[in-house]
């Protein structure tokens, strides 16, 4: 462990020292190339403005997603780089970041690295695209290129310390950071170039892009409110899952005792007056047992734990379900068969997928009249494997179809949980479940899985 830590510590220390040093060298080259003379002395006001804006951006980072914040400090830094001479722009950007980092009490090491990062990016950007005083399309294009050079270098250097600290590959970390931040980065670059060009061509209009800041603030507050609401909702759903699991487990033991005693009473009262009452009690206890099992299944399907995927042969899975439910189907006088039109395999959580199919088969057997047939079939669809469960029951009322897969949409045939479990399992696998039904002609539930 110590050897590994040493392995990462040495390159990290080199980076923490090397990046600020490289930034100073590049800033010196930019200063030597472009000088310190401002095209317009009024632009020197950008120096204190940049310091103040970066400090505010550090103190109040803008949230653009529930878990992501973006620092608007890149905007004033870019404007300073594009409008100030190469001898002043990069230095202003780097020193303002150093001051802003210290303003929010970041360590000297982190502040120096961030400032060096910005200094290096700003120096390269100023060499590419600093703006003069005249209107020029080529100049504007170079300014745009310079802005994107700044953002690219800044991002590339920003992920160096996390790569060393976490041990993750640099390229992988860079790709992830770029994927997460590119919309905000492109927006900031476009805004900085627009403000800079407006400052040159129409100074009074240069501040117009800042009119979006109040909208960004309101959006920020709305996102925070939504994030808080989502957290509360997740807490409620987690509590609901725990409640369902706890209740089903707590009731299972006394229910088993009740069923055992009812079985004894039924044997003792055969032919007696209480036989029908005991038989009804046994049936209700069995129904409660099935409902508790489905509550546990629903809580399990709702869990956010990763699916335990494995390669599943759907022909074998459907044959296994048919074997398991043949006895129940025979008791109901229903013929249960499986058909495989095309062999198919999917990567899925076998237990969850079996539970979903078992619920569909159980419903189909219970609604089918004696002498009917329930078919569990497998075939290939345009988007992936299809699994269909077809019955010849009474069909489903049209007014129930819009809410058919919602929880506790109880019908005469069940508790209203089986279809909800099936839909949740299928959705977690990235698939879809549909129903085709007609009154008096039965129903067909079709699951389509990706792959």
Image (tube, helix red, strand yellow):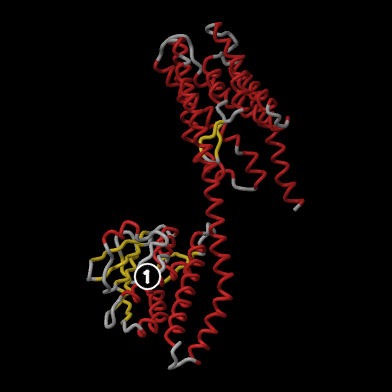
Instruction: Give the labeled residue for mark 1.
Output: 360
Q: Where is residue 180 in the image (x, y as percent from the top left)?
A: 51, 40
Q: Position of residue 351 (x, y in %)?
A: 48, 70
Q: Give residue 376's quadrant in the image.
A: bottom left
- In the picture as drawn, the residue positioned furthest to the top comes out as 41
The residue that appears at 55% across and 10% down in the rendered structure is 43
* Residue 29 in view of the camera: no
Under tag 1, what secondary structure?
Answer: helix
Q: Residues within 10 Å of mark 1 (few under 14, many from 20)?
A: many
418 vs 216: above or below: below
Nearer to us in this view, 408 or 42: 408
Position above or below: 228 against 141: below
Percent position of residue 374, x then y: 30, 76
Residue nearer the viewer, 53 or 84: 53
Which residue occupies the extreme right position in the image? Answer: 2
Q: In which quarter of the image is residue 253?
A: bottom right
Q: Quadrant of residue 355?
A: bottom left
> In the shown orientation, is residue 26 left or right of residue 347?
right
| Foreground pick, 223 / 179 | 223
Q: Along the horizontal axis of the image, is 411 left or right of 302? A: left
For the C terminus, give its image quadrant. Answer: bottom left
- Left or right: 418 as drawn, with respect to 336: right
Horizontal side of 282 relative to 170 (left or right) equals left
């Amino acid at each position: 462990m110590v050897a590994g830590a040493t392995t990462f510590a040495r390159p990290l220390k080199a980076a923490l020292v090397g990046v600020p040093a490289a930034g100073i060298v590049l800033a010196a080259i930019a200063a030597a190339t472009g000088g310190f003379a401002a095209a317009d002395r009024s632009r020197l006001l950008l120096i204190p403005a940049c310091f103040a804006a970066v400090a505010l951006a550090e103190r109040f980072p803008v949230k653009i997603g529930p878990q992501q914040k973006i620092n608007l400090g890149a905007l004033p830094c870019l404007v300073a780089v594009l409008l100030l001479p190469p001898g002043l722009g990069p230095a202003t950007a780097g020193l303002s970041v150093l001051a802003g980092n210290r303003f929010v009490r970041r360590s000297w090491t982190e502040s120096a690295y961030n400032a060096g990062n910005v200094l290096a990016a700003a120096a390269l950007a100023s060499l590419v695209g600093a703006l003069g005083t005249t209107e020029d399309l080529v100049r504007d294009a170079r300014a745009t290129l310079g802005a994107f050079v700044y953002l690219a270098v800044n991002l590339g250097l920003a992920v160096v310390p996390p790569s060393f600290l976490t041990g993750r590959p640099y390229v992988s970390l860079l790709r992830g950071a770029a994927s997460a931040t590119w919309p905000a980065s492109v927006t900031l670059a476009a805004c900085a170039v627009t403000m800079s060009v407006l400052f040159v061509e129409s100074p009074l209009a240069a501040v117009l892009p800042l009119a979006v800041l109040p909208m960004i603030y309101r959006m920020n507050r709305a996102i925070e409110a939504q994030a808080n609401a989502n957290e509360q909702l997740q807490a409620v759903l987690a509590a609901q899952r725990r409640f369902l699991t706890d209740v089903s487990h707590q009731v299972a033991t006394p229910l088993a005792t009740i069923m055992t005693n009812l079985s004894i009473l039924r044997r003792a009262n055969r032919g007696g007056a209480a036989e029908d009452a005991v038989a009804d009690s046994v049936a209700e206890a069995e129904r409660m047992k099935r409902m508790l099992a489905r509550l546990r299944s629903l809580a399990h399907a709702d869990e956010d734990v990763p699916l335990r995927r494995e390669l599943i042969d759907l022909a074998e899975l459907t044959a296994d379900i048919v074997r398991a439910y043949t006895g129940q189907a025979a008791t109901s006088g229903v013929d249960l068969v499986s058909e495989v039109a095309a062999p198919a395999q999917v990567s899925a959580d076998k237990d969850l997928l079996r539970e979903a199919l078992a619920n569909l088969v159980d419903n189909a057997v219970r609604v089918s009249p004696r002498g009917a047939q329930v078919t569990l079939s497998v075939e290939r669809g345009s988007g992936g494997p299809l699994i269909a469960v077809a019955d010849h029951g009474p069909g489903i009322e049209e007014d129930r179809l819009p809410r058919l897969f919602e929880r506790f949409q109880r019908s005469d045939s069940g508790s209203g949980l089986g279809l909800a479990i099936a839909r949740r399992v299928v959705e977690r696998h990235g698939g879809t479940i549909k129903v085709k039904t007609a009154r008096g002609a039965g129903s067909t539930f079709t699951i389509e899985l990706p792959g």
